[in-house]
Image (cartoon, grey):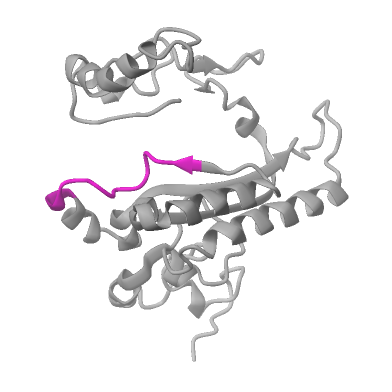
Amino acid sequence: MSMVCQGLNEEQAQAVWAPFTDWVRASPADFTLDGEPQIGAGPARRWWDLKSNPGLVPDPRAGAAAQHGWWRGDGDEASLFLYGYESQWLPATLLEPAQRGQLAAALMGAAQFHAVQLHVNKGLAGAPEEVNERARQCAMNPKVVDAFALMIVAAGGPPPFAGLPITPPSVTEAHRQAKRVARAAAVLRALAPQSGSYLSETDFFRGDWREAFWGANYARLKAIKDRYDPEGFFFVHHGVGSEDWSADGFTPVRS
């Protein structure tokens, strides 16, 4: 289990977790700890400081820059050929007693196809209302304020880069894994089909990207885009206004 917080010092963070850790220690017949929980706090500016953050691993390759590294356990993601990637915000209403069974059944059903991750640090449900109100004013889908987690289902393999001493990825396996990812995600998406997705961690080929990434904010964002960039000089795949251009961004298709 790994989580992050903001605005708490070390004593406050430890106090938040104390009821849980005390409960675990009081139930030795049911639970054991592999090690003592590491609960602390530090300046955010050192979040990516290899010397200050024990959660980071330096790049072991010869000649790598001293500041290059990645999170412990994320080494595979440093060079990954994605087979499939899906995400969906899961609303906090799914945690209510009347819907917990449905959520549990969906998680079990999705897991029959592929492993599912729930990133509870990315949903804003339960945050103070003033925080959520500010979040609604930013660009991303305002459904994030109702979400308790971001569901992610993804699969990948070694990168197909020429010159690297690796086995080229199997296209057959890639297609097989992509189908499993899609089937797993579909089970959970059915619980809240209009809850949206996080544009920085999502399906590159998502068809409903305007509604999924920006939701009710899209019309406002498109108006801003048209006002300050009427010629569409700035283009990105599935970005605001990209529907006015061909997929490669070179040919206008605006009616």
Q: Residue furthest left?
A: 130
Query: Is residue 237 something that shows in the picture?
Result: no
Name the one closer to the observer, 179 or 235: 179
Q: Residue furthest front?
A: 29
Main SS category, magenta section: loop
The image quadrant that residue 9 belongs to is top left
- Vertical position of residue 250 compared to residue 127: above or below: below
Residue 86 magenta = no
Residue drawn at (83%, 25%) of the image? 165
Question: Which quadrant is the N terminus positioned in?
Answer: top left
Q: Which residues are magenta?
A: 118-131
Q: Position of residue 6 (x, y in %)?
A: 24, 31
Residue drawn at (49%, 72%) of the image? 242
Name the one closer to the observer, 195 or 105: 105
Position of 99 compared to 223: left or right? Answer: right
- Vertical position of residue 183 compared to residue 15: above or below: below
Name the one closer to the observer, 237 or 115: 115
Residue drawn at (29%, 48%) of the image? 124
- Vertical position of residue 71 compared to residue 192: above or below: above
The image quadrant that residue 216 belongs to is bottom left
Position of 181 compared to 246: left or right? Answer: right
Q: Position of residue 245 (x, y in %)?
A: 53, 77
